[in-house]
Image: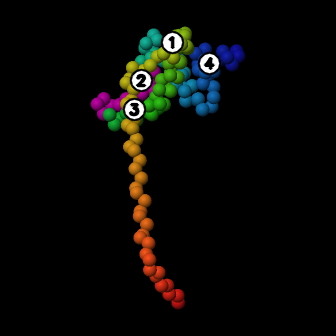
Amino acid sequence: MFPKDWTPPCGSCCTKKYAALVQIPWRVFCKKGCDADGDTWEDCIGECEEICYKDPVFKDQQWSSYIDRSPGDDSYSMECFNACISGCGFKFDIPAEKVKEVRPSRPLPPPPPPAPPVTRPDPPESAPATTKEVPCTSA
């Protein structure tokens, strides 16, 4: 038995796609897509959304979303979703072009508000020039 036979082909595809050291978290989420329990492409997409986006752990308790183990930040959630969908694509032999077209059904976060304009305080006016010399004394 050779090493390439030790892992399922879907997991090997994830390992190749996310081979860089900094891509290890995305490799994990890709493999989660490979191992998803759904029997169809649509079920797999739904599971990726559950894995990658924070939801309350306790019903009607929004604060409990902080203990959900998804990535959290919106950009990380999107990266996670893309990696997981890649795994689903490998699992169901979906063409890469179709995999790239998939978007989460969750609404995108609103754009950040525009930054307020920066106002600089007026420079302090210099002391008025005096025409008299001030005598100085020394000790």
What is the C-alpha distance between the residues marked 4 and 2? 23 Å
Q: Earlier in the sequence, mark 4 or mark 2?
A: 4
Name the foreground residue: 100 vs 130: 130
Front residue of this view, candidates 95 and 60: 95
Q: Which label is found at residue 50?
A: 2
Q: Dividing the picture into quarters, in which one does residue 54 lie?
A: top left
Q: Nearer the viewer, mark 1 or mark 3?
A: 3
CB-based contact (under 8 Å), mark 1 and mark 4: no
Q: Which quadrant, please, contains the N terminus?
A: top right
Left or right: 131 as drawn, with respect to 56: right
* Residue at the spot of label 3: 111
Residue at image location 50% in from the left, 27% down from the top: 79
Whether 57 is among the magenta residues is yes
- What is the secondary structure assignment of the residue under circle 1? helix
Give the secondary structure at mark 2: helix
Q: Residue type at mark 3?
A: Pro
Query: Real-space Cα distance between discs 3 and 2?
Result: 23 Å
**Residue corresponding to mark 1:** 98
The amino acid beneath tag 1 is: Lys
Q: CA distance from mark 1 to mark 4?
A: 20 Å
Segment tinted magenta in the rendering: 48-61
Quarter holding residue 48: top left
Say whether disc 3 or disc 2 marks the residue closer to the N-terminus. Answer: 2
The first of marks 2 and 1 along the sequence is 2
First in sequence, mark 1 or 3: give its number. Answer: 1
